[in-house]
Image (cartoon, grey):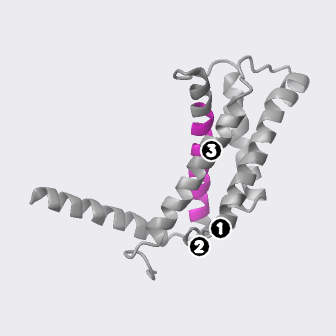
Amino acid sequence: MSKMKSIKSEVSLINNIVNKLLRLSRIEKILIVGLLDLFLVLFSIWLSISIRLGEFFLPSDNDYFTFLIALFLAPIVFWQCDFYKVVFRFLSQRHIVQILKAAGIFIVGWVFIIKIIFPNYFNIEIIFFPRSVPFILFITLNLFLILLRFSANNILNSSNFKNRK
């Protein structure tokens, strides 16, 4: 009986959180999604390098610039690709293509800055940057961005949250 009560309290907690999120203004929701996207970008970069190395990656020295560039570049690219005009309740295949394009543009720009701009104009050399990392990053970043959006879509379209104001 206590297990059933625990499950009901967890569902109630999730319902309260989702209802509070639904009541936020559009700008507040965009900020939350933008911060989640930034986290996913940073996590995807770290995960891609870790997968390539086959071990837990700990950045050192100039490796931090790879993450710093991503923090500045990702929001600009995602905003320019109209990433945040999508209403999560109405996702479609067109939005998946939009995510793939934005992630691809971000990764190309990120690699260009790290491998061309930094060494040639700022004398900052990223010592370890395998060529396979951008490909792994493309897969992981798209996976996480699409999962985030479709998870939100499923939650928002569940019967508990339809037609709520």
Q: Earlier in the sequence, mark 3 or mark 2?
A: 2
Marked residue nearer the N-terminal end (3 or 1): 1
Is label 3 in a helix, a strand or a loop? helix
Do labels 2 and 1 touch, CB within 8 Å? yes
**Distance between mark 3 and mark 2 Cα atoms:** 21 Å
Is residue 38 rendered magenta in the image? Answer: yes
Q: Where is residue 2 in the image (x, y as percent from the top left)?
A: 11, 57
Number of residues whose C-alpha sits closer than 10 Å to that of mark 2, classed few (under 14), some (14–19) or many (20 or more):
few
3 vs 1, front mark: 3
Three-letter amino acid code at disc 1? Val
Magenta residues (range): 29-46
Label 3, residues with CA under 10 Å away: few <14, some 14-19, many ≥20: many
What is the magenta segment's predominant secondary structure? helix
Which residue position holds label 1?
Answer: 86
Q: Disc 3 versus disc 1: distance between alpha carbons?
A: 18 Å
The answer to whether any part of residue 35 appears in the image is no
Q: Decide: marks 3, 1 in contact (CB < 8 A)?
A: no
Q: Residue tagged by mark 2?
A: 90
For image coordinates 81% across by 41% down, the residue present is 109
Q: What residue type is labelled 3?
A: Leu
Residue, x 58% and y 48% (percent of image)?
Answer: 143
Look at discs 2 and 1 and give the one toward the viewer: 2
Judge left or right: residue 152 versus residue 84: left
Q: What element carries label 1?
A: loop
Is residue 114 highlighted in magenta? no
The spot of residue 117 in percent (x, y) is: 87, 30
Q: What residue type is labelled 2?
A: Phe
Q: Vertical placement of 81 versus 103: above or below?
A: below
- Relative to residue 25, is residue 10 drawn left or right? left
